[in-house]
Amino acid sequence: MPLSSDQQAEIDALRSETRQTLRATVPGMEAHLYKAYPVLDHGFVRVVDYMGDDAAICQAARVSYGKGTKSVQNDEGLIRYLMRHWHSTPFEMCELKLHVKLPVFVARQWIRHRTANVNEYSARYSILDREFYIPAPENLAAQSVVNNQGRGQALTGEEAARVLEYLKADSTRAYDHYAEMISDEGQQGLARELARMNLPANVYTQWYWKVDLHNLLHFLRLRADTHAQYEIRVYAEEICKLVADWVPFAYKAFEDYRLGAVTMSAQMVDCLRRMIAGEEVTEENCGMSKREWREFMGVVG
């Protein structure tokens, strides 16, 4: 169950309240507020709060001039210009606060983005729930033979069944020992801050994560990419849907200039020009490493 009964009760109470405000609001995000969107087997993402909209980005960019008679079309064009030319500070005027429930190993990958404010559930004070991420069979894959940090083909047959059984049994056994160690029935009970070290990396944790739009888009550019690890990519894809309803102009520019774009090295650009000029460019005469050539060919076909 992604949400506890207490969390669901809190959400229901918050969604039943209506508040008047003079600040800018976005209907799309108002509809998302407090709703929990499921991710993986026990995780979720939900919007706790947000600040700003597309107009706030433009307001910051035009701080010297004021809004004046600028139209909506001008706003979209300006946002696309800012995104295209890597102007970052106007996007920092918008912020998003999320409540995320995720496996610990995903959280440790996520926290590498050190440009957000984070407050995580503390296993020093509280007892973690008996919830673990167990991959669906189609997401069990062998090690990639070309990428040391990637996956290859899916495991099949007896090997897949054995791996799933190991994951389930080891997770259950580790939690059973955790619960037994902290119990004070007939014993002193080990401190929670020590007992937690016995838990596996697929146990679920939770945090509040607040980030500005510029750094959020950087996170999404890396984690919503098809090369990102599946378990963090599905969270990024869910957040992408929220951002699209929050700042539609900015998100469309992000899709065009970041998410769906490619970056080429000087050597790649030179090779592309040579190809357009009719020259035969090969791995031997391209001046690139084998890996860079493979990436280049993945772009140009």
Image (cartoon, rainbow, N blue to C red):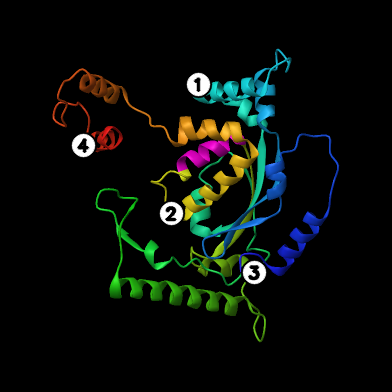
Is label 4 in a helix, a strand or a loop?
helix
Calculate the distance from the C-alpha at mark 3 to the C-alpha at mark 4.
50 Å
Q: Main secondary structure of the magenta part?
A: helix
Which residue type carries mark 3?
A: Ile
Please tell me how crowded label 1 is: few (under 14), some (14-19), or many (20+) other residues with Cα within 10 Å. Answer: few
Q: Earlier in the sequence, mark 1 or mark 2?
A: 1
Calculate the distance from the C-alpha at mark 2 to the C-alpha at mark 4.
26 Å
The image quarter in which residue 157 lies: bottom left
Instruction: Single out the residue that lies furthest toward the right.
Output: 20
Tell me: residue 212, above or below residue 159. Answer: above
The tag on residue 127 is 3
Which residue type carries mark 4?
A: Lys
The tag on residue 230 is 2
Which residue type carries mark 1?
A: His
Q: Are marks 2 and 3 in contact (CB under 8 Å)?
A: no
3 to the left or right of 81:
right
The tag on residue 85 is 1
| Residue 113 or residue 70, whichever sits in front | 70
The N terminus is located in which quarter?
bottom right
Q: Earlier in the sequence, mark 3 or mark 1?
A: 1
